[in-house]
Image (tube, rainbow, N blue to C red):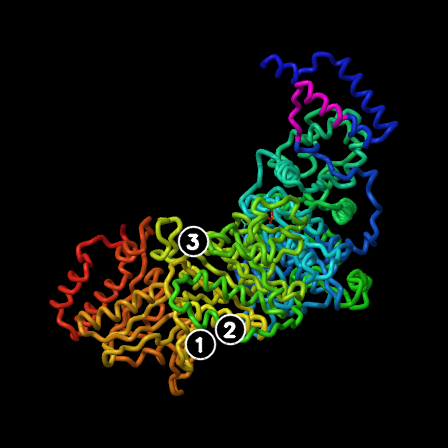
Amino acid sequence: MLKNKEERQNDLDPQETTEWLEALEQIVDESGPGRAAYLLETLLKHAAAAGVSVASKINTPYLNTIPAHEEAPYPGDRALERRIKSIIRWNAAAMVVRANKYDPNIGGHVSTFASLATISEVGFNHFFRGSYGEEAGDLVYYQGHASPGVYSRAFLEGRLSEDHLLNFRHELRDKPGLSSYPHPWLMPDFWQFPTVSMGLGPINSIYNARFLRYLENRGLLAKTDRKVYAFLGDGEMDEPESTGALHIASREKLDNLCFVINCNLQRLDGPVRGNGSVIQEMEGIFRGSGWNVIKVLWGSDWDELFARDSKGLLLKRMEECVDGEYQNFKARGGAYVRKEFFGKYPELLALVEDKTDEELGQLRRGGHDPVKVYNAFKRANEHKGQPTVILMHTVKGYGLGEAGEGKNIAHNQKKLNEEELFYLANRFDLPLSKDDVHAISFMKPAGDSPEVRYLKERRESPGRYIPARAPKKVTLKAPALEIFSESLAGSRGREASTTTAFVSVLKAVLKQPEIGKYVVPIIPDEARTFGMESMFRERGIYASGGQLYKPVDSDVLMYYKESQQGQILEEGITEAGSMASFTAAGTAYANVGVPTIPFFIYYSMFGFQRIGDLVWAHADSRGRGFLIGGTSGRTTLPGEGLQHDDGHSHVLSSVIPTCKSYDPAYAYEIAVIVQDGIRRMYENCEDHFYYLTVCNENYVQPPMPAGPNVAEGILRGMYRYQASETGPAQVTLLGSGPILNEAIKAQKLLADKYGISADVWSVTSYTELRRDALIIERWNRLHPVEEPRKPYVVESIGGLDMPIIAASDYLKIVADQISPWLPGRLTALGTDGFGRSENREHLRRFFEVDAASIAGAALSRLATWRRYDPAKAQQAILDLGLNPGGIDPSLA
Ligand SMILES: Cc1ncc(C[n+]2csc(CCOP(=O)(O)OP(=O)(O)O)c2C)c(N)n1
Ligand SMILES: [Mg+2]
């Protein structure tokens, strides 16, 4: 074995090697690289059969993927484009430096865009197409902290005013401001995709490109050659979300997707891979994941050096250097490059003896050369059958010189002094006077200047600007509540869960001719858990290439049907990917004018706490749709234990401003919420979304109670479900989800055993009750002379002179949300602590949310209110089987 290794590493017969190499060269010369590749591949197969193992190499040499002789000439006016780019560079830097001069610590970034400017400008001038009328536009995800560059271009295009630039990161003043990063929520006419939480752009762009294909295959969107571009940082690629879904893009053959990775070799603190090569690492990952990889490493000025380097020493030296050294070569200047890079080999030193140190320092990286960048984009656009990634080799803080170029401090550099600003102006030949630099003035060529005219021409048709968010007003008519008659009527004595109830609500929506086709069910491999498997055959599972096999269960009614027109997105075990699909579907109304209604149903424990940031970005995207947390409730999901039993998703969902969270108890509540949700989101075009928890406990689903305020109460958060039948209530019981049944049982217990009358309310949403109360409280605070208004919770139960026991299957803090408006009255029972593997009965007793615990709490509270004898209350607690000395579940 050792011998074999030695043989492989040392050339034992150089003459034989030379003969083989010459033979290969001859084939390349005479028959071309295609024939040479064929022969090599055939040789490899033959070798494998003969027992010669040659590990296939995933990397190509550290060279540009597109050789100089294959390049297309640059189609634009290079000189004019450079002038425009320089102005954009200046204004982008000026915006940040000014903001920080007059408002220290307001933040912003200079160095990211400095490294991206050429790539971004070539893209804008020659590739990215904005939507225009009915013409489809490209979707572009920008690197979030390069936003000053995007604003700066929009300023030259006349889309943003000087006031905007002056108010970068000043969004709350009397003049229009610009948000720090791409935020559709804050700049709804401008930004489409929130990207600055690293890693979300990559996964969301993949699933968005895939969703476009889904819409096309289902006939909901015309087929176009629209592209999805995602600009990403090389540091950003370390996020698991960045690379975790690459295989989806290749499996789905997303040639409508192009990643552009700005490989400036640095992240915030320092080099991304100081001791290695981030570009080669990325190449391996992407090629291994089935992507087309284009490396843009070296600028045109290296071409003639490569041409003269007959021995391949230049490439050898390049491959020896780690990224930490490449960073030095840019930060330390030409003399250093001569000594440390070329100086390693005398032949390389000789190769550059005709060049000055300055020239060596200016040898460009590929991502700063428009010709190389143009050709990469062009080839990516022409590539079929695979997604493309362009790895652009750049310099962080390009052009900043001493102020940060290639330095570790580059990322946070935002305060350039006057000398550094002068350097920048000179570096890019900007005609700025001393006064202009001193005042950090913005540059704006006149409307009829060649620069502005060129920019506008490049946008092809007036108005085709990008980024632009311009949702078309597409509205759907919400179905009438009556279509859910099955849910409204209840289960007629049969037992059913709220999960089943939800599925029948979903099916009823799907059956609606007008809106059914827009529904997008999204499931991460739990359809059978939720009893949705009949939908496989009814609706089909989306498979871009159709079903290529006969399903194993083809002889049964509910077989596993995959189809190119399938409606269900069965995503497999990826909550993150499913959430990305949810966002693609929930924002399609704005991005492509198709009002798809996503329903993403998942194991609730693996929702907000696992993919909370993607949900947050969904909100920022003004996304719509329904998140359904299945198998929810810490005591309602039996058997599974602490990593499955969700008792806190309602805490997590409550922090998202546009997420309306509901914990429904009964089928009709779900019907009312879903019907009204569709009305508000798709008929009224309100930009919010819903979170409903559903559970797997079977119980009789009652019919919707009569009464004018029930539907309103369900939507606003509470309604009286069952008034006391034994006289005026002495205590109010609040219950949510399946725990409402425990409250009802407690009502009976209290009446039968202790002679206490109680009203029972169903609370569908503490979060909505709190939000309503906060809004009203604020109004009252700001209008002290006006008649105070009443929050809905106060209108409902505020005036009652009695204690309130609120029980839910979630943390106590969920019910406590309404405590401030019920001073001293509310006792929350909830499931604080880790879940356990047990049955429901034991779980509810342990967490003190069962009927006995609710009744005990009611008597105890009545005792402290001096409306019940404390000694009797203590005795009742024992009689009810509660254990005053037992462990506190929140501590166990
Ligand atoms: C999830 C997340 N973690 C941390 C940050 C903070 N952050 C912003 S930019 C940045 C460095 C980015 O480096 P890179 O992706 O290489 O981009 P570059 O600026 O070098 O182009 C960091 C750590 C963030 N925005 N998001
Ligand atoms: Mg970087």
Residue at x-position 26% and y-position 74%: 758
Q: Nearer the viewer, residue 685 or 261?
A: 685
Q: Position of residue 721 (x, y in %)?
A: 35, 74
Q: Is mark 2 within 8 Å of ligand 1?
A: no
Which marked residue is nearer to the observer: mark 1 or mark 3?
Answer: 1
Task: Give the residue pinned by disc 1.
Answer: 711
How many residues crowd mark 3 within 10 Å: few (<14), some (14–19), many (20+)?
Answer: many
Kind of residue sitting beneath label 1: Ala
Q: Is residue 54 magenta?
A: yes
In primary-sequence order, the first of circles 1 and 2 is: 2
The numbered dot on residue 676 is 2
Task: Give the residue pinned by disc 3.
Answer: 605
Q: CA distance from mark 1 to mark 3?
A: 29 Å
Q: Is residue 611 above or below residue 762?
A: above
Q: Nearer the viewer, residue 373 or 338?
A: 373
Kind of residue sitting beneath label 3: Met
Kind of residue sitting beneath label 2: Asp
Secondary structure beneath dot 3 equals: helix
Q: Position of residue 158 (x, y in %)?
A: 72, 68
Quarter of the rendering containing residue 441: bottom right
Residue 154 can be seen in this image: yes
Q: Are marks 1 and 3 in contact (CB under 8 Å)?
A: no
Q: CA distance from mark 2 to mark 3?
A: 26 Å
Q: Position of residue 539 (x, y in %)?
A: 60, 58
Which span is picked out in magenta? 40-57
Q: Are marks 1 and 2 in contact (CB under 8 Å)?
A: yes
Q: Nearer the viewer, residue 710 or 765?
A: 710
Q: Are marks 2 and 3 in contact (CB under 8 Å)?
A: no
Secondary structure beneath dot 1 equals: helix
Q: Is residue 637 magenta?
A: no
In primary-sequence order, the first of circles 1 and 3 is: 3
